[in-house]
Image: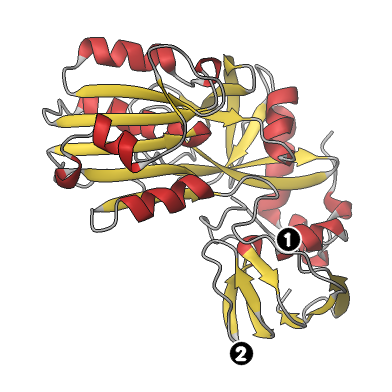
Amino acid sequence: MKTFPFIYNEPREFLSFLQPKEWANFFLGELNPRFSVTATKAKVIEVKEETSDTKTFVLKPNWLWKGFVSGQHVPVTVEIAGRRVTRFYSLSSHPNDRYLQITVKRQKGGLVSNFLNQNIKKGDILELGEASGEFVLPKDLPKELLFLAGGSGITPIHSILKDLQTLNYNGKVTLLYFVRSFEDIIFKSSFDLMQKNVSWLTVHYVFSDTPKEGYASGFLTKEILEKYVPNLKSSSVYVCGPSPMQTKALSLLEGLPIKSELFLLPGQNVTKVKKEGTVDVFLTLSHKTIQVKGERSLLEELEEQGIYPQSGCRMGICHTCVCKKQTGSITDLSNGETSQLGEENIQICVSRAESNLELEL
């Protein structure tokens, strides 16, 4: 039997369980885990090992799935230690494929990425939300495209390249894929096959940790761009990777049309500080006051004290964690900017406390 939601932080979550639709979901789920009148449930059809720390989960969703556009991400919800936790993952398959695919790389300190890689197997059920995101191709395709990927940032780009194949694209595409080593390349066999089947795609791998003969090494630089992308100024650019790569790319490519998908690794802050003492955070809806150090995101510091606000991507993309800040100052970790003291909506996953705060939580 499924666990009743007595363990949730908010009483309203238990009250919502008493609604007719929630009861219907509960009993339908006992008949078949994929049955639901409100939730998109997906059965794991296959688990593919891409690298030593990355797996692709092949999913068969129920009838509530609304589809997606190549480059978009989807919220994935799992139950860990009695608590429902949601993270966003890019879809690595093509929209016309029979099944969905998400590809998840284990991250140090990543609660859900580690849970999925360690525990999810064929036959298990995952709960999905609606796909979203603007990291997609335009209606009028550019003649030249440059994709810059770092680590697991390759996942939406893989889907986009598969889409270009189906569209019979006849321009020119360059992919620069930055990874730690040859063994860490995700989708290498797929990219090899693509390059055999189409003439417009060129893939270059750049290794940051373990050099390999015949391949470039290091990080994103002006020299690497000039070497591998001679027509850089005429290219439309897509960037997906961690914060340092994102910052460097935006600096080097200033003035070019760029679409970017930024992600922060667990515990990674754009601006790192060491503070003394604590600040008070008053949660107006819960009537609680807690003390935080202001060294990490508000979301992380709240969770550390057993308070679990709604959240999704944890990287400033999905806006699930947006709440109203009534007073106080925060630093936006995605750009390093410090806010004024007045009222505003903030994303607590990329906000760090700079003073005493009042949050509508």
Question: Which residue is most to the front?
Answer: 223
Q: In the rendered picture of this protein, how many numbered marks are placed on residues?
A: 2
**Residue 342 disc label:** 2
The correct choice, above or below, for 119 with respect to 79 in the image is above
x and y percentages locating residue 339 in the rendered image: 58, 80
Q: Quadrant of the C terminus?
A: bottom right
Amino acid on which disc 1 is placed: Arg
Amino acid on which disc 2 is placed: Gly
- Compare residues 271 and 162 and report the one nearer the observer: 271
Residue at horizontal 16 percent and vertical 17 percent from the top: 199
Q: Quadrant of residue 143?
A: top left
The correct choice, above or below, for 237 with respect to 294 in the image is above
Label 2 Cα neighbours within 10 Å, binned few <14 / some 14-19 / many ≥20: few
Q: Quadrant of residue 269?
A: bottom right
Mark 1 or mark 2: whose residue is earlier in sequence: 1
Say whether residue 151 is left or right of residue 291. left
Residue hosting label 1: 296
**Residue 183 disc label:** none
Label 1 Cα neighbours within 10 Å, binned few <14 / some 14-19 / many ≥20: many
Q: Quadrant of residue 193?
A: top left
Say whether residue 55 is left or right of residue 16. left
